[in-house]
Amino acid sequence: MDKGLLYIVAMPIGNRGDISRRALEVLASVDRIAVEDTRHSGPLLRALGIETPMLAVHEHNEQKLLNKLIEQLQSGQSMALIPDAGTPLISDPGFPLVRACRQAGIRVVPIPGPSAVICALSAAGLPTDRFLFEGFPARTASARRQQFDCLKEQPMTLVFYESSHRIVESLKDMALIFGEDRPAVLARELTKMHETILAQTLGELCHTLESDADQRKGEFVVLVGGAKVDETRLDPESERILRLLLDELPLKQASALAAKITGRKKNELYRYALTLRQA
Ligand code: SAM
């Protein structure tokens, strides 16, 4: 018997009109839909006219159910995996199931659609050629600050998910570590009635949320502009080597030797050595 297929189906992130025609066809045709929470997905699927049986698969039982799900797929039954909102596996369950299916030779078919990270990036007006998606920031202040500290030199746009419970604390920590003047965009309630996309500095965003309780409600994507790259600055290791050599040798020799050690251009190191000496 042919193996069944596992469909990874993206769902709306608010506006039900964003479900794709292909998603509806797949959801109506599979034997079972794996959902995170039947109380959430039941009414949505009924409203979309889908009557396929549901099975609750969430982060607490996913590992336990794995063998049973793989057996069902191997016996020829097909299944769709949907999250509460957006694309499965993007800050949502499903990774162990997809990995196990691929290891078992079961075909995994993505049915693309909305995801808050891409939706926010597409309208934020920050560079999108490279971005770093961090998911949810750590919950405790110390772990969160440490996480931001590791990201503060990144030149690409940073993207975070955040809930209404922690949005103010997270924005304050971002302002503290990335700097109050760093440009940022707060994308709130995307595709919903109260959709708001605010482009301000991190300091201004903290102030906006503190002074307006409505802006603290709902679901958020926080986008932070990347760190400015100082073209004239050397990477820390090359600078360390150059400084050590400058302590012992004349400028020209130190730059030439540093170029051999680091593989960087001699002229570039010479110019940098000059600024170090002047400083
Ligand atoms: N799988 C989803 C996706 O592809 O975007 C993300 C699920 S994650 C559990 C939920 C988080 O996504 C929310 O806390 C919020 O940060 C973000 N999010 C989801 N829907 C959103 C929306 N309509 N507007 C803004 N952020 C949203």
Image (cartoon, rainbow, N blue to C red):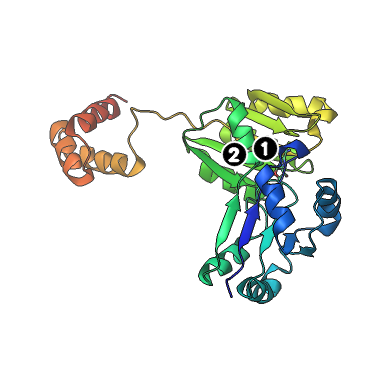
Secondary structure under tag 1 reads strand
Residue 79, given in percent of the width and then of the height, sits at 68, 63
Q: Position of residue 235 (x, y in %)?
A: 34, 39
The answer to which image quadrant residue 225 occupies is top right
For the point 27% across and 39% down, the residue is 243
For ligand 1, give the image quadrant. Answer: top right
Q: Dot 1 corresponds to which residue?
A: 221
At 56% from the left edge and 44% from the top edge, which residue is drawn? 133
Task: Tell whether circle 1 marks a residue whose Cβ is less than 8 angstroms from ligand 1.
Answer: yes
- Say whether residue 140 is visible: no
Percent x, y of residue 20:
68, 42
Residues at badges 1 and 2 in contact (C-beta under 8 Å)?
yes
- Tag 1: residue type? Val
Where does the N terminus fall, quadrant-wise?
bottom right
Q: Is residue 262 visible?
A: yes
> Which residue is pictured at 66% across the width and 40% down the height?
116
Q: Quadrant of residue 63?
A: bottom right
Inter-mark Cα distance, 1 to 2 = 7 Å
Left or right of 137, for residue 272:
left
Sequence-wise first label, 1 or 2 = 2
As drawn, 78 above or below 193: below
Q: Amino acid at mark 2?
A: Val
Is 202 displayed left or right of 263 in the figure?
Answer: right
Q: Splitting the image into 4 quarters, where does residue 234 fall? A: top left
Q: Which residue is mark 2?
A: 159
Which residue is more in the foreground, 227 or 23?
A: 23
Task: Give percent across and percent down for residue 89.
Answer: 63, 54
Q: Residues within 10 Å of mark 1 (few under 14, many from 20)?
A: many
